Image (cartoon, coloured by chain):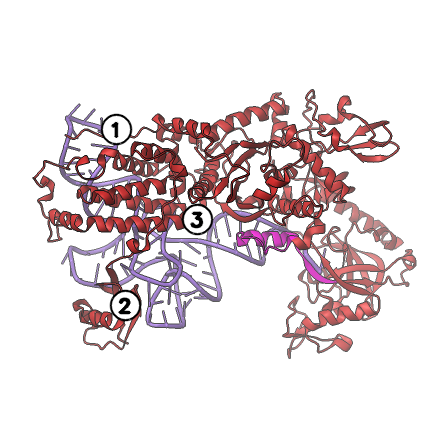
Chain colours: A red, B purple
Amino acid sequence: MTPRAERLDPAAYEVKWRERWERDELYRARDDVPGPFYLLTMYPYTSGDVHIGHWYASTGPDVVARMHRMQGAHVMMPMGFDSFGLPAENAAIDRGVHPADWTKANIDRMRAQFQTMGASWDWSREVIASDPSFYRWTQWLFLQFYRAGLAYKAMAPVDWCPKDQVVLAREQVLGPERRCWRCDTPVIKRDLEQWFFRITKYADELLDFSQLDWPEPILLMQTNWIGRSEGAEIDFPVAPVTAGSDAGAVEPIRVFTTRPDTTFGATFMVLAPEHPLVARLTTDERRAEVEAYVAAARRQSEIDRLAAERERDGVFIGSYAVNPLTDEPVPIWIADYVLPGYGTGAIMGVPAHDARDFDFAQRYDLPIEVVVAPRGAEPSSDAAFTAHTDDEVLVNSGEFTGMSASAAIGAITAHLAERGLGAPAVSYKIRDWLVSRQRYWGAPIPIVYCDVHGPQPVPEAELPVLLPRDVDFAATGVSPLQSHDGFLAATCPVDGGPARRETDTMDTFVDSSWYYLRYTSPQNEDAAWDSEAMRHWMPVNLYTGGAEHAVLHLLYSRFFVKALRDMGHLAFDEPFLALRNQGQILGADHQRMSKSRGNVANPDDLVAQYGADTVRLFLLFIGPWDQGGPWSATGIEGVHRFLTRVWNQAQPDRGAGERRPAPSVPGMPPRSLAGEIPGSGKTAADDLLAAIAGGSRSLRRITHQTIAAVTQDYGLLHFNTAISKLMELSNAIGEAMEGNAGGEAVDEAVDTLILLLAPAAPHIAEELWERRGRPYSIHLHAWPVADADLAAEDLIELPVQVNGKLRDRLQVAPGTSAEEIERLALASERVQAYLDGHEAVRVVQIPGRLVNVVTR
RNA sequence: GGGCGAGUGGCGGAACGGCAGACGCGCCAGCUUUAGGAGCUGGUGUCGCAAGACGUGCGAGUUCGAAUCUCGCCUCGCCCACCA
């Protein structure tokens, strides 16, 4: 028996290599090396445990980073922790652990777990959001925004989670039932003074994606989120006839509409219940009912205002306005389907051409006036009719009758503008970003309140405003900062007198809006970043993460960069040039992985059993990386077998010629080759001889085809197909070795296989590279380049179809003429049999791909 | 309700106008092993002894040719959800 090769034992080398790489600073990104490539993965929240989803999200980008590095780029792949936020505080309340301690323990555990992946992170650039060395600069950024007029304080009705006792951002309230994004509790409304960032100022520029290579769905979501609508604002004068109200003294009511062409059809108006004019326009006899409705709307908004499918209801307030085009009086209603925060908080009701207005008019018997109709058709008021293309024309619209609806939009707006009753207007769904949180575990907002001078920014030299450590957490969740005398006591920067410190902290999305900037110079103590390093690395070349951040983190980060650019702090427009989303790994139950569901898959056991490389490779192999799917370790044996096979094939004594033992007794064909392969008419020995004869050439061809395919697949993040091609190369190597053929070609193939495998399975590649006597480190070795001549096939197999069905195959040399191929195809016995006497009327040829003989 | 995406063997998936099911899991048979495991070889869409026929959610269409393009329907997933 030949001595068995040393068994694959990842435990024997994985840790060794990771320590060596770390010691040699192999992945350290330097600011002075040309060819920078900034590859960023969304920094993880400090939940406490690294689960399989973290591995999935990290392994793919690491493959790309490693390939780029071998291709000559100087790659920076930094890592850090999103460590502020609610769970740390909840842990403090529930278990009496200080958030800082909880967070630090989690980071230490997670960092150690992350390091078992063997990913090429530059840990020397680690950024931790809750570390004063970081949040000092978060506070500094707040002050820049404040000075630029982009941070302001305003009274606002805010969404309040009664369970977590926190104000929620608009995008943290989910679904029609308006539930808290963290705890699923229905939220209520409360009026509070809040800090905002003026993201709306950048609404238009944020709609410009021209510099971005991002997934289309993400761009669509951001576009919808910003929600730009073009239309007009139109003033409806309040009718003086209105009795019992002080309507005579009231300014016109301004509405926003995207359909100014339908103004002739406005037969009523609706104000949001919160509209400031409601109280003044309500007549005495309607007052009781109106006030009841307003109160109900307010109360309902405190319960589940939008929970169920609701009838669209409202109340007439007694006053009338005047349609500026028809001069007809129109009744003014209030209804909660009109939102106070969008447009002007008031609409003109055009029931013939808006489904909501139609419902409302039906319910309250309001007149329905059709003013747009398909060209040549009878006007109909059966249902709301809402199109406005060139095919619709205005009817019953005075001088505009007969004009196309699309043209009338501009014409009517202009007509109203001339008379001072309207103007073109743009409206957006996006609201300013509410950044203040009434919580402890966040970056304190660096503002103090002086009785004499009002709110004042903390001088930059006094940053950071540190979170006090000695705090008591109440189960109610009220921020302990509000009762901490030492924290509250401050000095007015203007007169040096006593002041009270702001107790709100910042939304953690503020941290994540700039952490990637800090990675460029994370240890800088004099500034948020070094401008040289910033110029060198930014913008990020490739950003990867989950699609769930489509409109939160990604939009805020873009806003930050544009705002800081306009302040002169940055010299580029976009933070992330290319974005790719990995799919989500779900629990085995097809649900999102969460501790409470108990379906979190822990990779540590798999790593202990198979080694990190196998786990990495398996995650890359299970399917398209952008797709994700439910977790199952079924099949991990397959990639482990593959690595075992590579391990055995790559042992130095398995190489060329005499260095490897013959498969059996020398001079004798192996016994098992003597028999005939059933049904083939050939013996196994025939196949073997053929393999030996053509073996080295075809193995070289496969090797170079694999280089080309894997390079392309890695670049496209198609890791699953890349791995399958590596498996095919290994299978081909196995056959060549079985045939004892072509030592040099085998050596080339094995070296190539290891090089191509290195990004995906870095430890085993390094180990085998060393065992084969190649110089350390494989991860600094040049990436193989495919030789197109060697990769080219010298015989092409052409499928031959008859009427689209496969009937035969031709073997032809490249360059065989179409005439010759047609002759060969028609001469085929099988083709003739299927022609069945019919004549071939046509022969379709796709060069190099296929021949189709058509008989009808 | 609106938008986006996806439906392919027992399973994960490949092919994305041109040989459907690459690669792997699982399963079956054989070899090897004291045994277990591992390893190796072959097979494995469905029906059929075979020749062959049929097969990519359902139904139409375009095309010499459709898993792929178009239209309608069904199912699932994600996002948005009274935004005038």
In the displayed structure, A726 sits above or below A272; it is above
Q: Which residue is mark 1?
A: A6
Mark 2 or mark 1: whose residue is earlier in sequence:
1
Marking on residue A146: none
Which of the 4 image quarters holds residue A168? top right
The span shown in magenta is: A206-232
| Helix, strand or loop under label 2 | strand
Neighbourhood count class around disc 2 (C-alpha, 10 Å): few under 14, some 14–19, many 20 upward:
many
Task: Determine if marks 3 and 2 fall on one subunit.
Answer: yes
In this picture, residue A719 sits left or right of residue A445 = left
Residue A311 in view here: no
Q: Is residue A215 or residue A416 the one in the foreground?
A: A215
Q: Amino acid at mark 1?
A: Glu
Q: Residue at x 60, y 26 (%)?
A: A91
Please state, as top left, top right, bottom left or bottom right, where the N terminus of chain A lies in the image.
top left
In the displayed structure, A319 sits above or below A629; it is below
Measure the C-alpha gap from mark 2 to mark 1. Answer: 51 Å
Q: Nearer the viewer, mark 2 or mark 1?
A: 1
Marking on residue A851: 2
In this picture, residue A220 sits left or right of residue A417 = left
Callout count: 3
In this picture, residue A94 sits left or right of residue A431 = left
Measure the C-alpha gap from mark 1 to mark 3. Answer: 34 Å
Neighbourhood count class around disc 1 (C-alpha, 10 Å): few under 14, some 14–19, many 20 upward:
few
Please state, as top left, top right, bottom left or bottom right, where the C terminus of chain A lies in the image.
bottom left
Q: Amino acid at mark 3?
A: Gly
Q: Which residue is mark 3?
A: A715
| Helix, strand or loop under label 3 | helix
Neighbourhood count class around disc 3 (C-alpha, 10 Å): few under 14, some 14–19, many 20 upward:
some
Mark 1 or mark 3: whose residue is earlier in sequence:
1
